[in-house]
Image: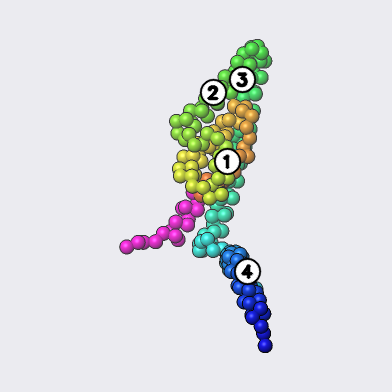
């Protein structure tokens, strides 16, 4: 049989254990809560695989997509050919006029003719941009990149901007500005492709709402 002292000892040990358990319970509960939140935020790994069956962004007919692609390529080829031909013709005329003035009169008249031709071409370029299409006053490359990244640019890819940008590019190169055709040509391609796509794809994406 156990004596009184042993019984009191058992009671004291039991109360100590219960106190230790009570003190450890908040820590255990916080640890359990953190584990639960981690398990909830961690995505479950499965063996399932994603299968894509063709483009999911639109359901245009196959022939419409090919027509848009071929018309854009053919249109840009024609635009580039005309641009290079006109630039080379006008630049050759500019220098031949200067040389004729130098040979027939004096070098100062040749310089004045050259400066006058360049200033006239630059003035026409400026008037076209500021009066008809102010949004066509740059290469359009930053705006084009922003549009490809999902930013909306209302009124940028219009027929007027495309025509003015084309003539401004030719006039700037003919006037002798240190600019190239690469940036405006890329933007012209995006503009032309947008116009062709709106023209050919609109009947396939339009729906009547009652």
Q: Nearer the viewer, mark 1 or mark 4?
A: 4
Label 2: which secondary element: helix
* Residue 29, horizontal then vertical, whole percent: 58, 67
Residue 1, visible in the rendered structure: yes
For the stretch drawn in magenta, the main secondary structure is: helix
Residue for badge 4: 20
Residue under circle 1?
Answer: 142
SS at badge 1: helix
Q: Residues within 10 Å of mark 2 (few under 14, many from 20)?
A: some
CA gap, disc 2 and disc 1: 29 Å
Range covered by the magenta-colored residues:
195-210
Q: Is residue 66 above or below residue 117?
A: below
Instruction: Residue at 54%, 55% (x, y): give it.
Output: 68
| Residue lying furthest front | 4
Check whether the beta carbons of the residues at disc 2 and disc 4 lie within 8 A of each other.
no
Query: The C terminus appears in which quarter of the rendering?
Result: bottom left
Asked whether 62 or 47 is in front, the reply is 47
Q: Residue at x 63, y 16 (%)?
A: 111
Circles 4, 3 touching at the beta carbon (< 8 Å): no
The circle on residue 120 is: 2
Q: CA distance from mark 1 to mark 4?
A: 67 Å
Whole-angstrom CA distance, mark 3 to mark 2, is 10 Å
Whole-angstrom CA distance, mark 1 to mark 3, is 33 Å
């Amino acid at each position: 049989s156990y004596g009184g002292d042993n019984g009191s000892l058992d009671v004291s040990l039991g109360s100590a254990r219960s106190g230790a358990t009570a003190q450890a319970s908040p820590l255990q509960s916080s640890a359990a809560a953190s584990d639960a939140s981690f398990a909830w935020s961690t995505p479950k790994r499965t063996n399932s695989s994603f299968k894509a069956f063709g483009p999911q962004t639109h359901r245009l007919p196959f022939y419409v997509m090919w027509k848009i692609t071929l018309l854009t390529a053919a249109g840009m080829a024609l635009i580039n050919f005309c641009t290079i031909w006109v630039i080379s013709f006008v630049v050759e005329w500019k220098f031949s006029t200067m040389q004729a003035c130098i040979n027939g009169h004096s070098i100062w008249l040749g310089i004045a003719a050259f400066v006058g031709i360049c200033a006239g071409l630059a003035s026409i370029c400026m008037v076209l941009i500021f009066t008809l299409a102010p949004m066509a006053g740059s290469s359009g490359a930053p705006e084009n990149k922003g549009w490809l990244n999902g930013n909306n640019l209302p009124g940028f890819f219009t027929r007027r901007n495309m025509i003015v940008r084309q003539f401004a590019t030719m006039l700037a190169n003919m006037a002798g500005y240190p600019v190239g055709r690469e940036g405006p040509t890329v933007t012209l391609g995006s503009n032309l492709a947008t116009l062709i796509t709106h023209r050919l794809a609109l009947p396939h994406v339009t729906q009547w709402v009652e």
